[in-house]
Amino acid sequence: MTILVTGATGNVGRLVARELAGRGVPVRALTRDPAKAAAAPAGFPSGVEWAVGDLARPGGLAEALAGVDRLLLFPYPDTADEVVALAKAAGVRRIVVLSSAAVTSGYDTTFHLPVERAVEASGLEWTFIRPGEFAVNKLELWGPSIRSERTVYDTDPDWVGSPVHEADIGDAIATALLDDGHAGRAYTFNGPESLTVREQVAVLARELGEEVRVQEVTPLELRERYLAQGGFAAASADFMLGFETYDGEVVEEAEGFDLSEALVEASAEIVTGRPARTFAEWVREHAEAFR
């Protein structure tokens, strides 16, 4: 059994590849950039086989799919139908999709949902993993202002979230890829605890051993900060702060992105059978990135 992991150099994909290889499962990791793959963080087992390919160019995926039995599919809606058809023709029997709680809440109809539908229509075994708020996004959203000012800027510090550790997402995916009993299931989950932004910052401050302030700002002010930061923060600013819809349509008045409908009282334990990692555990593992 060989498993192809797409998005293998990302925050979740790399953990899935590492977990599978650590269990002795043959893993093929797809990358668009061999140089980036070669410089991947320490921790990739030597047994991981790298394959060059791009979901945006399905015609070049034949070699990567050859001999593959199971597939972790990163969401790329533009070519989902073609990629899934190629996977089925290559002999893939099981596909796990890294999806989003935004599908469960009804926000997402054009990004993750079309990928899910393409996989479901294939007739193959499928499982959809729909995590909510990724804790790892705080590295780019909060990291710069914490490092420079020991301050987190937010439009609603009393908003309650349940950040999910990326390792729990990876473990859930690996479980669905390897174990039976998950076919035909869509799992929506969050972190194991609900915390306001203020409470999350307090946890972070405690683990850092330093004071970290919370400063409430308007959506426009935070948008300017995120655009200045660049990277993920800039790319996601309009969507997260409500200046555009999930589908990219501009709105006249910022409404904010509310996933409260998807804040189910469930963690990755519903898939893995193990207690999910707390936000404090996540902070301890990433503390150096905030110093």
Image (cartoon, rainbow, N blue to C red):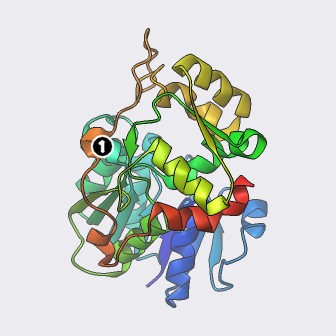
Q: Residue at x 38, y 59 (%)?
A: 191
Q: Residue at x 53, y 56 (%)?
A: 203
Q: Is residue 122 visible?
A: no
Q: Position of residue 270 (x, y in %)?
A: 26, 69
Closer-to-camera residue (30/148): 148
Q: Position of residue 197 (x, y in %)?
A: 47, 42
Left or right, 90 with respect to 210, comes to left
Q: Residue at x 67, y 27 (%)?
A: 225
Q: Is residue 25 above or below residue 291?
A: below
What amino acid is found at the position of numbered circle 1 in the picture?
Val
Q: Quadrant of the N terminus?
A: bottom left
Q: Secondary structure at mark 1?
A: helix
Residue 217 position by quadrant: top right
Q: Is residue 122 above or below residue 56?
A: below
- Image label count: 1
Q: Position of residue 171 (x, y in %)?
A: 43, 73
Q: Which residue is mark 1?
A: 103
Residue 232 position by quadrant: top right
